[in-house]
Amino acid sequence: MNVDYIIVGLGLAGLAFAENLIENNKTFIVFENHSQNASLVAGGVYNPVVLKRFTPVWNGHQQLAYALPFYQKIADNFNQELDTKFNTKKVLKSVEDENNWFSALDKPTLSNYMLPKISRDKIAGVISDIGFGELTGTGRIDTKKIISTYRAFLAGKDKIRFEKFKHHKIMFKEQQVVYQDIITKKIVFCEGYGVKDNPFFNTLPLKEAKGELLTIYAPDLQINFLLKSAVFVLPIEKDIYKVGATFNWKDKTVAPTEDGKNELIEKLKKVLTVPYKIIEQTAGIRPTVKDRRPLVGVHLKHPQLAVLNGLGTRGVMIAPTVAKNLYNHLEKNEKLDLDIDIKRFG
C-alpha cells in the first residue's frame, strides 16, 4: 500500500492534520490504539482569556478565528452539533480582582471578549461576594463526539488501524518510509503523552499533567454559562455539569483516583451551595510544555518524520492552526511559527 502520510494518534492534533490531508486530496492511514484519552475526556472549552491573570491567551484571537469555522465545517459534513456557545462568568474574589478586570479592558484583544462591567447580581446556588466578570465569545467543542465520529468515519473508509504503532519497525528508504505493508513519504506523530515511548522524539521537553473531571447532576443549579471559580462548572445538558479540573504532575496513570475526586469535592464547597450527585469521574494526561507552546516540527536526522504534540489545556483552540502550519511546512516549505518549532529547544 502506498500513501502520502501515516498519522500516529487520532486525538485533536491527529484529527486536525487529517482534515488538512483530506482538503488537499492526500492519501493517508491512521494508527490509533486508544492509549491516550486526553482529547476524549477534555472539557473542550475555548476561551481566549487567561482568567487567572486576565491576560490574552497566546495567539488566542487568531486561533479562534480559524478554529471555529474549522469545527463548523466538520459539523456540517457529519450533520452534527459540535459547538455550544455560551458566556463565561468569573467569580471575582477581591477588590484587586475587580481592579485588574477593568485594567485588562484597556488591552485591545481582551476588550473583544471582556464585558466592561461587574455583575453584582446573586446567582442561586453560587458562592460570590464581590461579583462576576463576564466573557463573551466562549464556548465548548464536544471533543468526545467529534473524535468518536471521526474515528468511525475513517474506519468506514479503511483509513484507520486500531493497533499499537511499533516505532522500531520503521524502515527508512531514500525519501520514503516503509512500515508493515505501507510505503509512505511522511509519518506525523500525534501521540500526546504517548510520545514518551517514541524513540525519535522522546527527548522533547514534554511535561505530563494528569487532569481529573467530575460529571455531576445538580437540578437546583440553573446556569447556562461556564462558571469559573476554584473549579470550572460547565453545563453539558439539562441539569448535568462537568466540574474540573485537577493538575497532578506525579501520577502518570489514566485511571480516576479517590484523591482527585476528593480534591474536586473540597473545591466545589467553595463554589456551590446546591446539592449534587456525582455520576461520572474521568481522567486523562495532558501533554504540556514548559513554555506553554506546542511541539511541532521535523526530525533533524530523519526528515520523513514529524511531530505535532504538546497542545496542553487549550487543544481545541490550538490544533487547527498548528496542524495547518505543519502541513504547509511539509508540503509547501512554509516556515513554522518560531513559537512552536521544536528547534527552539536546540
Image (cartoon, helix red, strand yellow):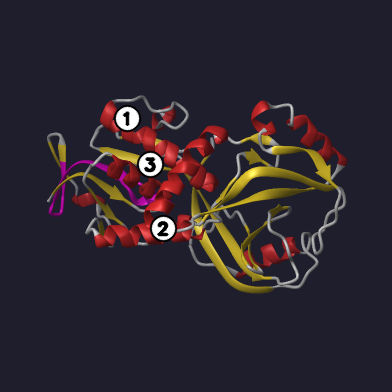
Q: What residue type is labelled 3?
A: Leu
Q: Where 41 falls versus 170 (above or below)? A: below
Q: Is residue 310 visible to the viewer in this orientation of the structure?
A: no
Q: Which residue is at 37% across, 62% downward?
A: 34
The residue sitting at 54% across, 65% down in the picture is 282
User: In the shown orientation, is residue 196 left or right of residue 23?
Assistant: right
Residue tagged by mark 3?
308
Q: Which of marks 2 and 3 is nearer the N terminus?
A: 2
Residue 136 is situated, as x and y percent measured from the top left of the image, at 67, 43
**Residue 59 falls in image quadrant:** top right
Mark number, residue 79: 2
Q: In this view, does 126 lie to the left or right of 171?
A: right
Q: Nearer the viewer, residue 93 or 239?
A: 239
Q: What residue type is labelled 1?
A: His
Q: Is residue 313 magenta?
A: no
Question: What's drawn in magenta, residue-wise?
Answer: 177-199
Q: Name the residue under label 1.
A: 329
Residue 130 vs residue 152, the one in the foreground: 152
